[in-house]
Image: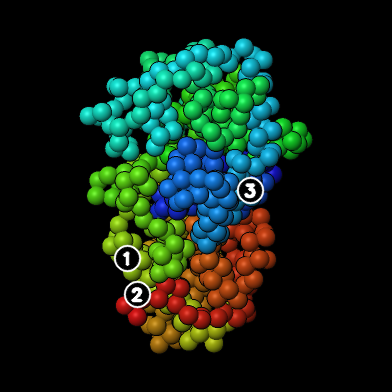
Amino acid sequence: MEKFYLTTPIYYVNGQPSIGHAYTNITADIIARYQRMIGNEVFFMTGTDENSQKNVEAAEKAGRADDIQGYLDEMSALWQQSFDTLGLTHDRFIRTTEADHKKAVEKFWQAVDAKGDIYKGEYQGLYCTGCEAFVTESELVEGKCQIHKRAPESIKEENYFFKLSNYRQALLDHIEKNPDFIMPKSRRNEVVSYIDKFMTDISITRQSMKWGIPAPGDANQRIYVWFDALINYLTGVGYGTDDQRFEKWWPANLHLVGKDIIKFHCALWPAMLMSAGLPLPKQVLAHGFFTIDGEKMSKSLGNVIDPLPIVQDYGNDALRFFLMREIRLGEDGDFSLSRLAERYDGELANELGNLVHRVLSMTEKYFEGEIPERAEQTAKAEAMKNYQANMDEFRLPDALEAVWKIVREANQFIELKKPWVLAKNEDLHELSDTMYLSLETLRVLAWLINPFMPETAVKILTKLGLDPGTEFAQDYFSGLTWGKLAPGGKIDKGEALFPRREE
């Protein structure tokens, strides 16, 4: 057993979760479930970023200027409830207004300050509240932020700065020695270019902010949201509060982020860790944007899709399946309800759902619902090997394609063998072999789809007369050993996995 520490970004609570947030966390949840399935000890963390000017503005807009903390409490609870509805299995939901996070930030600040990497200076320039970042004229399009489509504000104030430029060469060396540190490759090249040509010292406090963690020793300054927020990855595993726990879990195995915040995670964050004398995370994986009518989906643009009505209509597993089939991890994708309906009717109902229904119906008809004698395995080793290799390297759509190759081959096998003809001709040995091979394939499929569609995996095992808790308690590699389905067991066909939408 190895440890696997996985994080998502922490989210601003100035609005409700969108389908984009759901995509990030569902992706992380699939990775976490797979890591647990293969026997690793997993710590999966997500949460909310609450020391942000965005949140303050949202509270003020809601008439809660005198009760910002109360507003944050309510909004964070809404996010937690949404993630619970999505069936996510995070081990901690962190909030940056928690006392242990304040302790971690103060400890981290003192470590960086002791290194001589914090100094006071004047910042004069542009600040995008949407990005929570200082920007330059060259980053704007027609004077507006490329992402949030609004002009940044011009500010001039005395702030504390982090000597980010001191770590330029160390960052470039680390990325060169660890080519998988930033994935996908296209993002790595982007970060390297930024570090090499554009990276400068960065302001890490705001004099004008009245909300957030005060800078140690200077209550007139509030720590800049990114220098605060990134430290949550340390806070969550005990930095500043539980040395033994921190020693066990840090460094993180994987930070999963959106491509719009990759510079913070692959330039600022590792430089901060170097300054504080802490190990760097093993990998940062950036996914692309969701687009609606060709534009990035964002709260500020008002084109956000709420995932919860989709879950209510289709179920969690259908949404999880669609997101992994439709959008390649690391690339941009366009969300479409019509495409969701197509994949539900086609791949889920007609292919997987129909396979399960046919196999169980014929087992009822020809063997009175009993599992027949064992038969030798058909050739699925290559597909299962591809599945594992893709899962290990976070190529989730490719892993799911390997699973669907088995689904389609199983349907083709039934068409080839024609159990109804075997039964009519009383070729009982061939019929028995055909049905056992098909039933055992369903059991194997339940294992393979478990990280992606856990509710469906449980339903398949239950239909096969198995206890999902006992089945999935096995070692992954033992569970995938052919022939685990015991002859004589009773199946229970039950309801269709994916009822026809028109019904």
Residue corresponding to mark 2: 501
Helix, strand or loop at disc 2? loop
Q: CA distance from mark 3 to mark 1?
A: 33 Å
Q: Position of residue 282 (x, y in %)?
A: 57, 31
Label 3 with label 1: CB-CB less than 8 Å: no
Residue drawn 51% across and 80% down? 493
Mark 2 vs 1, N-terminal side: 1
Q: Is residue 383 left or right of residue 38?
A: left
Residue at image point 51% right, 81% down: 494
* Tag 2: amino acid: Arg
Given the image, on which type of amino acid does mark 1 rest?
Answer: Ala
Q: Which residue is mark 3?
A: 92
Please identify, in this view, whether the residue under mark 2 or under mark 3 is nearer the observer: 3
Alpha carbon separation for disc pair 2 and 1: 8 Å
- Inspect the image, locate mark 3, and give the three-letter code of the amino acid beneath it: Arg
Question: x, y percentage for residue 63?
Answer: 47, 50
Residue 262 location (% of width, % of height): 44, 32
Residue 185 shows in this picture: no
For the residues bearing labels 2 and 1, Cβ distance under 8 angstroms: yes
Name the residue carrying label 1: 341
